[in-house]
Amino acid sequence: MAEVNGVPNEIKSSALELIGNTPLVALDRLYTGPGRILAKCEFVNPGASVKCRTSLHMIRKAREAGLLKPKDPVIEVTSGNQGCGLSVVCAVLGHPLTLVMSKGNSVQRALHMEALGAKCIRVPQVQGKYGFVTQADFKAAEAEGIKLAEKSGSYFVNQYNNEMNVDAHYSTTGPEIWRQSGHRVDAFVAAVGTGGTFTGASKYLKERNPNILCYVAEPAGAEPIKGTPITKPMHLLQGSGSGCVPSLFNYEYLDGTFAVTDEEATEYRKLIGEKEGLFVGFSSAANVAAAVKLLQSGKLPEDAWVVTLLNDTGLKYTPVAEEIQ
Ligand SMILES: Cc1ncc(COP(=O)(O)O)c(C=O)c1O
């Protein structure tokens, strides 16, 4: 704690100190048991998502390794949340930032990044439609981002291949869950985008207690981790379910997967709002839907505690008129 004239104060020195240590809340009104769902409120991060953790860790580690010098420009390909997190971190640390994102991701994300001084390049979709980003749409944005990174010589964060993405969750999300639950975790559930959250937090939790079971929530019909053919590439779970197994995903920690339909994600999003007073995005709702399925599956003791993440705020998904999409 800081001190002025011998009087302690609680002033945070910058927005970077607002990242992580998110509260763990019991969803006891939505799910009344048997068992319990505990959710990490990642929307309270300053970039309004879990991705602030990885943004801070990847940039910090790149600076420590000398790969990124003060004032150097940074570039990243994002489905939005990583871009918002990097915008917070780069604004505070003084790095000019360019983000490349599919036009199918919500416009609120681009507005958020630009409000924090970043430049957002929105790449036209090749397959899906606004609000529904397919693997082909993501690949189109990725190709544009890689081309720009090579041309500009900016530091490319490369969240899909950056081991510090996993390490961020191994060193923060996992330990926080362990501490905040009083070491009482029976299972962990996460939706997968880059795989950073699942791999990092599961690794930490299984090291503490190998009996903790770790599950993935996948969009129904786009379940590459389960290993079934993609029959529905368009889904509502923006930021997750990109249609392929990301290179950072580690099967060693996987105990199983649950498929969540768009209808279930929509229903759970409404329930989380109306029963818990928490306005969250679709992948958060998918996590909770999968946690309920797990508790009802008979795979856990009756009084099990399942921990998951509320990945981002619902404000990033409010519908907008077609002309501003
Ligand atoms: C809304 C949302 N949910 C879930 C995820 C998945 O997180 P991870 O990339 O750690 O797998 C992301 C990643 O961008 C996201 O934006």
Image (spheres, rainbow, N blue to C red):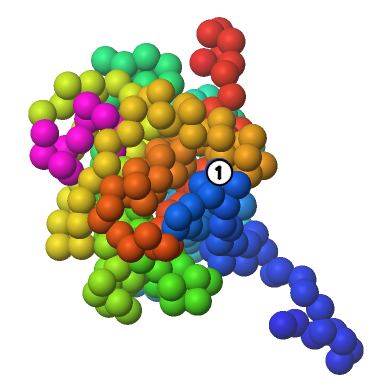
Which residue: 27% across, 62% down? Answer: 213
Taking the magenta stretch, the answer to whether it contains residue 117 is no
Which residue does the numbered mark 1 point to in the structure image?
30
What secondary structure characterizes most of the magenta part? loop
Q: Visible in this render: residue 95? A: no
Give residue 185's quadrant in the image: bottom left
> Would residue 317 appear left or right of 237 to someone viewing this image?
right
Taking the magenta stretch, the answer to whether it contains residue 223 is yes
> Would residue 160 appear left or right of 307 to someone viewing this image?
left
Q: Nearer the viewer, residue 220 or 242?
A: 220
**Of the residues shown, which amino acid type is indicated by label 1?**
Leu
Q: Secondary structure at mark 1?
A: loop
Magenta segment range?
Answer: 218-228
Residue 62, above or below 217: below
x, y percentage for residue 173? Answer: 44, 65
Which residue: 67% across, 64% down? Answer: 14
x, y percentage for residue 137? Answer: 28, 24
Q: Nearer the viewer, residue 64 or 197?
A: 197
Which residue: 38% across, 25% down? Answer: 262
